[in-house]
Every structure is written in structure tokens, then in C-alpha cells.
Amino acid sequence: MTGHPGGLQHTSEMAALARLAPPCRILDMGAGSGDTVRFLRSMGLDALGIDLNPAEDVAPGDILSAPFDDASFDAVIAQCSFFLTGDIGRAFREAFRLLVPGGALLYSDVCFDDPADAAVRAGFRVELSKDLSSMWREYYIESIWNGTADCFKNPRPGKKCGYTMLICRKE
């Protein structure tokens, strides 16, 4: 089981939808185990990752206050990480800060509200929004079965949990 629904196949699909190609410099915000960073490198991309609890190939860093200059990356990928911060709007704003003009944000995450709204408020143009809730349900049920499910840090009573993919551009 991977660290996010759809695993590396989903990562590959997102990269294709965003039209990423070498020598793209990409940051994985909330890189966890580093699997995505290593995968992106195998695609020829200049990939870096940050996480509060870094693993191999991942640097320590808070995605709400990343240790990089403005406009340092051609692309940012965030899979199952913005929701966990407790401040999704701030995470989108930080991704926007880190991207060069024309840079791409590849986002997929748990959501209780439409994340496209937060992306637009941060300054992004949303190129693609796709509901992947069925993929999330399968992933979560498998993690419950395997005993690896974490409880939600920020449940929203009365709101339906979904999983959304966005491909956004900084203009």
C-alpha cells in the first residue's frame, strides 16, 4: 500500500496532465517516505521533497513555510498533505509563492469543501478538477483492513468527505 490513493500510477497521470518534462524542477510538499520524489527523479525531473518527518531523500521542512525562495520551482506536487496542515488556504498560498510564473501545482487530497475555491483565492487558474472520491474510498477501506488507517485530524461534522485532484497554473 502506498502513501496516497492511486500510488505512483496516479502521480504519473498527474505529471502527464500537467505536461511536466525534464529539466522541470519540482517540489513534493509533504513528501513522507520519499517514494514520489524518487519516482519523479526516475522520470528525469529535478525533484526535491520536504516533510515535517522526513524519510530518505526528503529534507526537513514545513509546507506552510517552506525553506525556499520565491519562484524556486517549475512545479509543486502535493498528495494527501494540504488537508493535514489544518490550513489548506495557507498551503495553497505557499505553493503559489514557490512557483515560477506559469508553474504547475499538482494537487490531490481529502476535502470537505471544494479545494478549487482555495486554489483560486491563492491566485491559481484551475486547469482541471476531478472528483476521485471512489479511489479514496477504496484506499481508505484497504488501510482500515490493513490496520494502517489514521483518524482524521480535522473532521467536519455534517460535511461529506471527498477526494479531489486539481491541476493548477500560476499566471
Image (cartoon, rainbow, N blue to C red):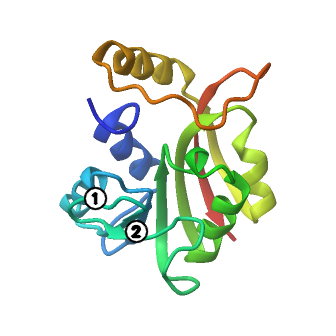
Query: Circle 1 is placed at which residue position?
Result: 40
Q: Quadrant of the C terminus?
A: bottom right
Number of dots carrying numbers: 2
Query: Circle 2 is placed at which residue position?
Result: 26
Crowdedness of circle 1 by 10 Å Cα count: few (<14), some, many (20+)? many
Rendered location of residue 102, percent (x, y): 60, 72
Residue type at mark 2: give it: Ile
Label 1–label 2 contact, CB within 8 A: yes
Question: Residue at 62% of width from left, 56% of height from top?
Answer: 168
Query: In this image, 32 relative to 160: left or right?
Result: left
Question: Residue at 42% of width from left, 67% of height from top?
Answer: 27
Q: CA distance from mark 1 to mark 2?
A: 8 Å
Residue type at mark 1: give it: Leu
Rendered location of residue 83, percent (x, y): 60, 44
SS class, disc 1: helix
Rendered location of residue 81, percent (x, y): 51, 49
Residue 168 visible in this rendered orientation of the protein: yes
Q: Quadrant of the N terminus?
A: top left
Quarter-wise, where is residue 48 in the image?
bottom left
